[in-house]
């Protein structure tokens, strides 16, 4: 395997900067200062057309003048200069570049052409570069900072890849306030050469990085993304925020599946398939990512809560419960140990409520140690371990009565030794989270943060932080994904599609679609086309009443509510009536499909549509009349392993329908999953199929049967 | 109308404190210090058994020694002393008390008895008191602070009633950091006398209070709560967090409705009925409450976004869209005005993206003023108006290059006049929200906060803050709620219930239940009881095939999946078979109900269960086999006005089923709403009915018909 291009990019022994000057309000200057001031120990070479000295370092007019070949060049120059400068660095043998300059693909065709030029240079000279239009990189292991903002010096364990530069620059002070520290952070920019998946691969291998966060606006190579994340995510937690598609962005399509598809729903499914924990805000992305990076992994669902107030305790319990955690009642023995330490009427059962209490040692060390020692829980949340924050708030009131004691003396007097408290997670190997209404102005909050214990500024957030760890416990417990080989292409199916396209069809008719499904082993209804009424009667006799009677022509993609379908036909007379009435509704003699009526009250939909970057994606959901009304549907990218297909089934809200249900047997899940796998395979084998709808897939007894089908062809 | 008891409680001319001493680590001392130090100008009388001087003020051994009758007494004494001291104050004529002391109802029967004693004293002497077991009150209008924490001096406009004391004490520094300021805040404690609804009424009338937030763990008088909030909420926004019931707290019950009922789902519905905006975290409760209190009301959905970075701009747009706002494209004229102020390739359409930009005047004043002036939007969100926070972060890098300029000089150099920026909401009467990753350490953040412009620390939160305003626009637009008179009790219905109870029935059988429904005008299926097979054939002939055949006995509450029901019976032979097979399944000769088959693919459920504090509550949801699988149900408290009942209908996720749907006509909503109103009325008229299930209510054409019914009787 070739070395990941990020390795050298993040560990250069020497860096040249084109675009730094002695003008302090230029971006390039700020970035050069970050290199010089944040502790990077490699060499620094400013490139400047006129200045002899830049920021105290000898400057060079051209790369060709440099005394050695720098490992990395940082380009912060006007757009037009990027290509010639990069090419000069290429000529002297520099192999890595970070291109901050903007004005490329994002500005239109001209910029697109310039960006193409960068790729050509890279290909010619074997350069790998980040950007253009990115905001830089951070590698805290060697104090390397190419962003405009100052870096937190102490190395951290959270790796980030971001498609928005803001989230590794503007937020650096925000992160410092919250005790969150990067291992590596990379702004991906336009991804003209190195892309977000390269970064992800690197962070997956990087030992310093214990958890990975991704800010994503769009993925170009969906299958590579999924393959990469599926390899990393069972070992190292990956969290991602996707912002880009909302309800307003939903696409139009000829099938129900197409109409249901929107980028947000797609990414929701892709993240689950990839084993990625989705976050819905930048705050959660950082805070939950840090939770995973800094705390021991969660090994079970049982949460202990210790609080100095009932309200926050209840809020933690409620939100932990919503996130799938339990708050078990402590054993009598454990409660007997706790009770002497709390007020006589306070609760010792879990949550432990000390009520208003200023001895944070009891609250945050003594009682928690007792609980963690007991083996009765898998994690602990503590609210109210406040000290100097609260003391500073009451000091103005108390100064006089304390004999005009100084604030410092007062705080020192009230301080407790919290060494044992902050070491609890390490000592017991169990995750701990703190809820406090006090930020870094409180010495306890700071101490926790400095010992890598996440502090959340509300009880609800602390609970959600712990619950995020549970998501990774579930991901670690996923069955191994074994991708089966695609079935061979069925020549009859291929022939039918060719013929249909040659005839100018925009879709296959229901019967054609089902013949293809049957050819690939999908269970379908028994049915035959009747050319006329007499034939219809004969076919129905063969199938046996009741039957369904449907108009069957490719132009008729949706039959409901238009008089083109009659269900539950039980007699010959009713059949003849239905035949005539459907022909009348169609306005002409039309092929009529006579079909067995499948008895079953559970109806699902399976489908397929194609997304840019992801190719064919398979849909599963609640079917029949409820498909659009309830929109209870999920997507995954094809091909699908059996595990991924079965995960889709239980990912719908109405999953209770899949089990034993009101006297009906449990659904044959492997059989239903195979239909989804086959839909994906058909889409991959036959790229001429644009969209697929199988709706309804009726559960007859426990077995799924496709009762209606639509294949839309590519225009 | 009698004066609200909170009026005097929040505006005392003199306060006695029992429990303050010269010991600084006592709660009573801290609270007395808050009275003395935070600017309250009334008189202060410490009561102390031995000390002569407390906190510099003459102390009195007993209330009876006081030179005047204080308007208010604050009690922070051991539990056993509360009753005698309160009684002494009662004797001298004090009419209001705040009882901090705990150890009452919350501790068991003994405490319960003590609390009862407090109520007796109050009743005897005409005292109204808050607590016991509360944390105090705040009235910023007169700088009155009875909590242990120091108060933000500047009066605010957000009123709070809290059933957890923490949220008006421990969080005071938290609120100060975020620029959120109370008008009045009241910790309700055990609500032995003054309850949360009294507080709500007061805040509704209080002119200083522009929005109200409630932290609720439980409501005792549900109807009074709803009536009070419905009066206030169209005028003054009310936001509430309810924490108490989760999935784990769902109740068991004999009916589906009972099984679906949980306190969380109930409060969700009650809040909607009451016109309350629900918040799911204490952070949102404060921040959204402050948004409503401090900003002009929102008058439309159109949001402008101005940002210095694409990522946050997209996040605001996405989350605003999820919250129901739109982000309209600006007119060509407006864009032409904006374009000269931004980079040539930056977006001027909305969001306006200035990209990395340090001139916050352009970002936060010039462009926003242009946009607000245009009339093209109803609100604006700005991201990135950072100044000193960012400058402090880069100063360590820049100090040297700036000629060792001091931080102060550097900051002064970079500062921009933001006067116009912070005045925008007032100038244009349009709400504005700021997203910034910098807190109060940034001078712009502080300036915004000090001018009552809410600053959120993430773009997602800023968007959700604006969307919260939209909820109140919707509440202001609610149709007026006109409560119809209850129908008169139907004597036949009452007789049937009496007879059933006398016979020891725990429920009514389906046919009995439907007779009661019909008596109150609810449309039901045509049906009759058949005593034997021959009668069944005769009845079916009268109704006309197809028919449903059902076992009908009160003991059989759920017929599905047990062979006790046969649907779609089309012939006499099938009817006879069904009759025999049902009798066989029942194991005995049993009354059999012959019923018309209602044709309709849309099935709903209506129901009723009783909740402590709220009495009968009506349920509506998706019915038939999906009821439990999808749990798409909503609750409201009875009686129901037509408006409230119709709001229930469109509150389900599957509301698309109510409109024109796959060739079916729109549902007759008033008819369906009338069923819900009638279910509520029946529950109020007949308290012997514990639970009601009408499932399914089938939509035949456009009209709802009750096809099955269960009335559970009180044990």
Image (spheres, coloured by chain):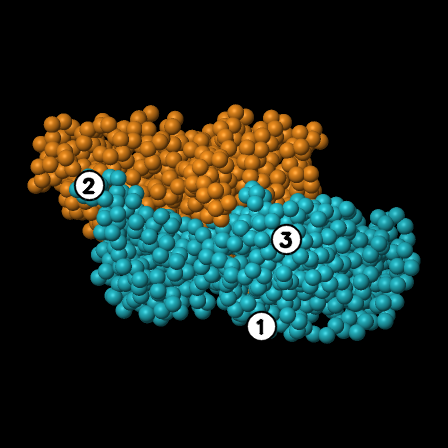
Chain colours: A orange, B cyan
Q: Counting residues from the N terminus, which is met first, the one under dot 1 or under dot 3? A: 3
**Res. B479 mark:** 1
Q: Counting residues from the N terminus, which is met first, the one under dot 1 or under dot 2? A: 2
Discs 1 and 3 carry the same chain letter: yes
User: For the point 67% across and 62% down, which residue is it?
Assistant: B94
State the residue in front, A673 or A278: A278
Q: Where is residue A491 shown, x and y percent of the image?
A: 45, 40
User: For the point 14% across and 33% down, which residue is it?
Assistant: A57
State the residue in front, A98 or A694: A98
- For disc 2, the chain is B
A146 sits to left or right of A712: left
**Res. B60 mark:** 3
- For disc 3, the chain is B
A178 sits to left or right of B638: left
Q: Check whether the beta carbons of the residues at disc 3 and disc 2 lie within 8 A of each other.
A: no
- Residue B405's image quarter? top left
**In the rendered image, which residue does mark 2 sit on?**
B404
User: For the point 87% across and 65% down, which residue is it?
Assistant: B496
């Amino acid at each position: 395997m070739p070395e990941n291009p990020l390795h050298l990019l993040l560990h250069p022994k020497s860096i040249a900067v084109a675009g730094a000057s002695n003008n302090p309000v230029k971006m390039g200057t700020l970035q050069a200062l970050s290199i010089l001031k944040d502790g990077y120990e490699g060499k620094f070479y400013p490139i400047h057309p006129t200045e002899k000295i830049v920021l105290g370092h000898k400057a060079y007019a051209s790369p060709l003048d440099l005394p050695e070949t720098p490992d990395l060049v940082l380009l912060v120059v006007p757009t037009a200069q990027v290509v010639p400068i990069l090419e000069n660095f290429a000529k002297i043998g520099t192999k890595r570049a970070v291109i901050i300059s903007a004005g490329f693909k994002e500005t239109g065709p001209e910029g697109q052409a310039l960006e193409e030029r960068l790729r050509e240079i890279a290909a010619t000279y074997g350069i790998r570069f980040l950007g253009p239009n990115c905001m830089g990189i951070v590698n805290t292991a060697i104090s390397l900072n190419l962003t405009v903002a100052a870096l937190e010096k102490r190395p951290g364990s959270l790796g980030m890849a971001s498609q928005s530069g803001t989230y590794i620059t503007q937020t650096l002070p925000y992160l410092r306030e919250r005790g969150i520290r990067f291992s590596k952070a990379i702004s991906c920019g336009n991804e003209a050469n190195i892309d977000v998946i390269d970064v992800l691969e690197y962070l997956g291998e990087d030992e310093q990085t214990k958890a990975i966060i991704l800010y994503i606006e769009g993925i170009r190579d969906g299958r590579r993304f999924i393959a990469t994340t599926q390899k990393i995510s069972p070992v190292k937690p990956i969290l991602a925020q996707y912002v880009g598609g909302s309800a307003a962005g939903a696409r139009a399509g000829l099938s129900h599946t197409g109409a249901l598809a929107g980028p947000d729903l797609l990414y929701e499914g892709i993240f689950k398939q990839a084993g990625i924990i989705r976050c819905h805000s930048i705050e959660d992305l950082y805070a939950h990512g840090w939770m995973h990076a800094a705390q021991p992994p969660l090994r079970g669902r049982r949460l202990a809560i210790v609080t100095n107030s009932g309200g926050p305790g209840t809020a933690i319990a409620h939100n932990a419960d919503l996130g799938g955690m339990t708050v078990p009642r402590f054993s009598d023995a454990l409660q007997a140990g706790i009770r002497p330490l709390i007020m006589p009427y306070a609760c010792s059962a879990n949550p432990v409520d000390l009520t208003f209490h200023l001895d944070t040692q009891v609250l945050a060390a003594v009682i928690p140690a007792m609980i963690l020692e007991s083996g009765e829980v898998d994690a602990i949340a503590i609210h109210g371990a406040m000290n100097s924050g609260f003391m500073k708030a009451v000091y103005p009131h108390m100064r006089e009565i304390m004999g005009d004691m100084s604030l410092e003396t007062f705080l020192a007097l009230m301080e407790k030794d919290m060494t044992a408290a902050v070491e609890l997670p390490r000592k017991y190997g169990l995750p701990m989270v703190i809820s406090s209404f006090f930020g870094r102005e409180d010495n306890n909050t700071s101490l926790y943060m400095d010992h890598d214990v996440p502090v959340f500024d509300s009880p609800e957030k602390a609970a959600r932080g712990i619950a995020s760890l549970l998501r990774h416990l579930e991901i670690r417990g996923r069955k191994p994904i074994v991708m089966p080989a695609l079935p061979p292409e069925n020549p009859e199916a291929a022939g039918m599609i060719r013929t249909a396209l040659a005839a100018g069809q925009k879709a296959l008719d229901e019967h054609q679609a089902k013949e293809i499904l049957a050819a690939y082993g999908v269970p379908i209804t028994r049915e035959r086309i009747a050319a006329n009424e007499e034939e219809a009667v004969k076919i129905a006799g063969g199938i046996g009443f009741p039957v369904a009677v449907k108009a069957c022509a490719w132009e008729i993609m949706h039959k409901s509510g238009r008089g083109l379908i009659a269900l539950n036909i039980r007699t010959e007379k009713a059949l003849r009536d239905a035949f005539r009435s459907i022909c009348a509704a169609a306005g002409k003699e039309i092929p009529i499909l006579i079909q067995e009526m499948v008895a079953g009250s559970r109806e699902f939909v399976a489908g397929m549509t194609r997304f840019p970057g992801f190719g064919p994606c398979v849909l599963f959901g609640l079917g029949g009349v409820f498909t659009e009304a309830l929109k209870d549907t999920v997507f995954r990218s094809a091909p699908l392993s059996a595990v991924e297909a079965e995960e889709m089934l239980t990912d719908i809200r109405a999953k209770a329908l899949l089990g034993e249900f009101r006297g009906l047997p449990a659904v044959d899940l492997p059989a239903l999953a195979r239909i989804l796998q086959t839909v994906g395979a058909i889409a991959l084998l036959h790229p001429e199929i644009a969209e697929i709808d199988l709706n309804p897939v009726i559960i007859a007894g426990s077995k799924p049967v496709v009762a209606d089908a639509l294949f839309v062809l590519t225009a």
